[in-house]
Amino acid sequence: MGASVKVRDLTISAGDATLVDRLSFAIEPGEVLALIGESGSGKTTTALALMGFARHGCRISGGSVRIGEVDVLTLGAAAQRQLRGRSVAYIAQSAAASFNPSRTIMDQVIEPTTIHRTIKRSEAEAKAVALFRDLALPDPETIGARYPHQVSGGQLQRLMAAMALINDPDLVILDEPTTALDVTTQIEVLRAFRRVVRERRATAVYVSHDLAVVAQMADHILVLRDGRMHELNATEQILAAPSHDYTKSLLAAARPVPREGGKASAAGGELLLEVKNLSAGYGPRDAQGRPASIILEDIDLKLYRGQAIGVIGESGSGKTTLARAIAGLLVPSQGQVVFNGRNLKPDLADRSKDDLRRIQIVFQMADTALNPSQTIERILARPLEFYKGLSGAALQRRIDELLDLVKLPRAAAKRLPAGLSGGQKQRVNLARALAAEPDLILCDEVTSALDTVVGAAILDLIAELRRELGVSYLFISHDLHTVRAVCDEIVVMQHGRKLTQVARLDYDRGPHHPYYELLARSVPELRRGWLDEIDALAGRSSARAAVLT
Amino acid sequence: MESNLTSAVPLLPDEPVPALAAAPARARRRKSGFGWSGLLGAAVLAFWVLAALFGPWLMSQSSTAMGGAKVFAPMSAAHWFGTDYLGRDMLARVIDGARYTVGVALVATLLASGIGTTLALLAAATGRWLDAALSRGLDTLTAIPSKMFALLIVAGFGSSVPMLIAAAALIYVPGAYRIARSLAVNINAMDYVTVARTRGERTPYVMLREILPNIVGPMLADLGLRFVYIVLLLASLSFLGLGVQPPAADWGSLVRENIGALADGGASVIVPALAIASLTIAVNLVIDNLTSRSASTRGRA
């Protein structure tokens, strides 16, 4: 049973800037409160402050945090250390970065008990095994003997939950614990988290930017923006009748809306790209020319001019490798890429300038896709000079046009990428691709690193560019919602193979390949009780399976 | 900003554009110029460079005249830094030595860093066999102890200023190469370099425009360090009598010549040692300020 948490006028500042401004809220024992907001809204900063911790350069400058009877902020450093890991536990976003690779999982899971000397090692191990079982981990008896690299990301995330719960904390803080996971893994982890939180009646704070996930976990939702509370209400209330405009926009962005992409007919259109029987991989090649580790096998794909095709799959399914092979960054071991009716050379270096111009690639991380030492103007000018030979006033005019096209202020031209926000960088990224006036843009997870609202605006832009300029897209994503919103057809990939292809008209009309159905089912829906229904469904089908066998 | 968008989302400004004025005051101050430590370093460095360029013409005392003065004389109005083991004016000797120390070390450092960085960019941008050949080739050079290598070169080709520059540069190319290569390989893996390649850019463009600007900061810091190493290498070569040959003398030779004064705490051995220290510290102060400046203009990345 958890303790109650009372936060009053919490203020956190960094230098002159106020990160969190007089935040007050309370959590009843055994309740889950969600902190939701976009990046930079102060949600993680607030969550860390509940442990009396401020990141380097930040300072908790006012207010009080009360967990049960303890006033956290008035405690000394030693007393706060006593508190952390014992009465307050923290589950971070990246479990992979939080585990020590050179120690066994069991050693690390029971470490909080040895640090705080709460229980004996044998008891702690027994308790850990019970937790592993509750968290639905495979081989609960022996999984502790493994090292972190020997379990999957989703399992590691659940093991971190076991580490957090081993001392029966009064308060558990979950900081985006499923954001880095694939949808099908996320659902497992969510289910496990919810079960342990409910069974233990733990008080929890769940930090996330994903409303649909939060809807399954939280009793109350606190909407944060720029360090200020915009709305705090029961989950049902927020989902059904949000009172604040910002909450409304968050909700709207979280609901997938198909964007009209213009007239792209698969039947009568001109074939732009055809991928035939493509295989690719990494490592040395054997006598038959097959690479040591094969990432892609026998991919066939047709894309008509003006069409947008989505490629979806979990991490490791080979979707990015497909884009790299089409772009010529990776030489396929077998098969061809036919573009505009001609065979493309497999290696980038052998392709003509015009072929290169016609296919542009836009990467996921706008941070690493823009050279930090070049101004936006320089970044956009280069493809214009390189492909079109523009200079002087014509070049300047075209840069301005491009900035208008992606809806960036012209003043942004003089800035360096570091002076722009994530969404703005992604717009520059798109503008650079458009500067080449390509036929096809390969979009690799372009919205994955962005907040929901910003990502939705980028999707709008992508759809609008398609309507106005007639560019085609190969849109790679792990998020079915995103792909459905902008694409005419969806290619589903798993383990380097194309499983099925689904056209827009059939998105909701089954039956489809079971893996597509699984992906579709795994995307959290924006309503309470969705996870319970899924659980019930899963329970019925497993019961049926039991009867059948 | 998005007014003409048929948006599926209630209209919201994308994200507030972070105003430049919001940058912390400290960053702005640094952007506008050096900190006090940088200014101090720059002043000392400028002093020694000016001394090297114009010093000999301004001196009333000749650096070679032995005159009637006492050997190892203490500081006095006539001889500000005292006299050396032959009774020569120490101030004139130090200023004369600045030409060798500053000139040889500076040229050798620029050569070593320049060659190392260029080869590293080439290796990172080209990759494959060229990278392997360059890396292993330069590793072989590292395997030879640097002072031994310098001794071999001087023994083989004689000691002259160009020879000293060449030897010092050659010895410090592998170190500069290693650091520059490890930085460049990281940058080479960035998406913007991939974008440049898919655009069809040639290797020189990738090297100079995409990679170089992003490794300049750390390479400048390395340049400062390398300068210190080279000054010390030259000083120790001179100390061994293999550097600049008498009657000319760099600061290292001055220390060696006057080592006899050490027992009496004579100015003639302390002053050149202090000169070496002040020069190396000054260069590093300047470099530190240069790099933090370029880091702050690049933004809070």
Image (cartoon, coloured by chain):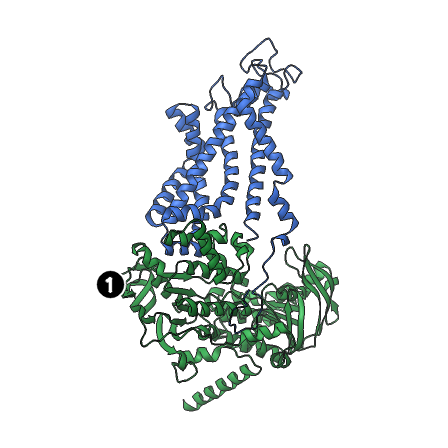
Chain in green colour? A
Q: Is residue B273 above or below residue A148?
A: above
Which residue is painted at 46% across and 63% down in the image? A364
Q: Residue furthest front?
A: A393
Q: Is residue B293 above or below residue A57?
A: above
Q: Amino acid at mark 1?
A: Gln
Q: Residue furthest top?
A: B68
Give the colour in which the image draws chain B.
blue
User: Residue A496: image x %, image y %?
Assistant: 36, 69
Q: Is residue A371 above or below residue B59?
A: below
Of residues A210 and A389, the one nearer the viewer is A389
Of residues A122 and A19, the one nearer the viewer is A19
Q: Residue furthest left?
A: A287
Q: Quadrant of residue B69?
A: top right
Of residues A435 and A441, the one nearer the viewer is A435
Q: Which residue is mark 1?
A: A288
Q: Is residue B109 left or right of residue A387?
A: right
Q: Is residue A510 above or below residue A73?
A: below
Q: Residues within 10 Å of mark 1 (few under 14, many from 20)?
A: few
Which chain contains the residue that carries disc 1? A
The answer to whether any part of residue B145 appears in the image is no
User: Residue B208: image x %, image y %?
Assistant: 42, 45
Of residues B203 and B137, the one nearer the viewer is B203
* Quadrant occupied by the C terminus of chain A: bottom left
Q: Does dot 1 land on a helix, a strand or a loop? A: loop
The answer to whether any part of residue A268 appears in the image is yes
* Quadrant occupied by the N terminus of chain A: bottom right
User: Residue B280: image x %, image y %?
Assistant: 56, 33
Q: Residue furthest bottom?
A: A547
